[in-house]
């Protein structure tokens, strides 16, 4: 993902700098916005939290988005993706693809403040 963002937006772009800073700081070694290939392949590399909100709103680009997500997670499995969509908006093929990528489907109701805090804390500990 780092290389794609670098090619798409440039090495000095804000998205590329953010990715490099997050990865570097998560490893305890800020390297002024650049990562070496050996650091990218290190077992210590911590992935990014990828929030993909509103898959149902992708309309005609939904399949392309899912294919990109699949290729990204196959190439860089360290990322933690979270994908949201309205209930009932995904077809069987999309659910199968997401399942094969390790996604778990569930419906959420409104959370109390205490429960939201607990979920956030547990999720951050896994990162």
Image: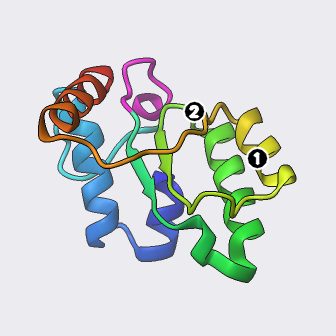
Q: Using residue 30 as the reference point, say whether residue 92 is left or right of it.
A: right
Q: Using residue 15 as the reference point, say whether residue 51 is left or right of it.
A: right
First along the sequence among labels 2 and 1: 2
Q: Position of residue 58 (x, y in %)?
A: 62, 76
- Residue of label 1: 95
- Which label belongs to residue 77? 2
Quarter of the image where one finds residue 25? top left
Q: Secondary structure at mark 2?
A: loop
**Does the stretch in magenta take in 45?**
yes
Q: Position of residue 75 (x, y in %)?
A: 65, 40
Which residue is at the front of the view, 31 or 48? 48
- Does 49 sit above or below residue 51? above
Which residue is at the front of the view, 107 or 75? 107
- Residue displayed at 45% across by 34% down: 40
- Residue displayed at 70% across by 70% down: 62
- Residue displayed at 71% across by 43% down: 98
Quarter of the image where one finds residue 120? top left
Quarter of the image where one finds residue 97? top right
Q: Using residue 108 as the reference point, say whether residue 105 is left or right of it.
A: right
**Does the stretch in magenta take in 81?**
no
Count residues near mark 2 (Cα–Cα under 10 Å), then give few for <14, some for 14-19, many for 20+: few
Which range of residues does the magenta coloring cover?
A: 38-46
- Does 10 sit above or below residue 108? below
């Amino acid at each position: 993902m780092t290389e794609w963002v670098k090619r798409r937006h440039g090495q000095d772009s804000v998205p590329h700098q953010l990715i490099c800073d997050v990865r570097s700081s998560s490893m305890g070694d800020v390297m002024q916005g650049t990562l070496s290939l050996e650091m990218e392949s290190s077992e210590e590399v911590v992935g990014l939290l990828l929030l993909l909100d509103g898959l149902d709103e992708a309309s005609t680009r939904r399949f392309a988005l899912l294919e990109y997500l699949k290729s990204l997670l196959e190439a860089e499995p360290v990322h933690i993706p979270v994908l949201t969509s309205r209930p009932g908006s995904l077809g069987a093929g999309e659910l199968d693809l997401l399942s094969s990528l390790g996604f778990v489907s569930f419906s959420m109701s409104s959370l109390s403040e205490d429960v939201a805090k607990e979920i956030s804390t547990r999720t951050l500990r896994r990162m």
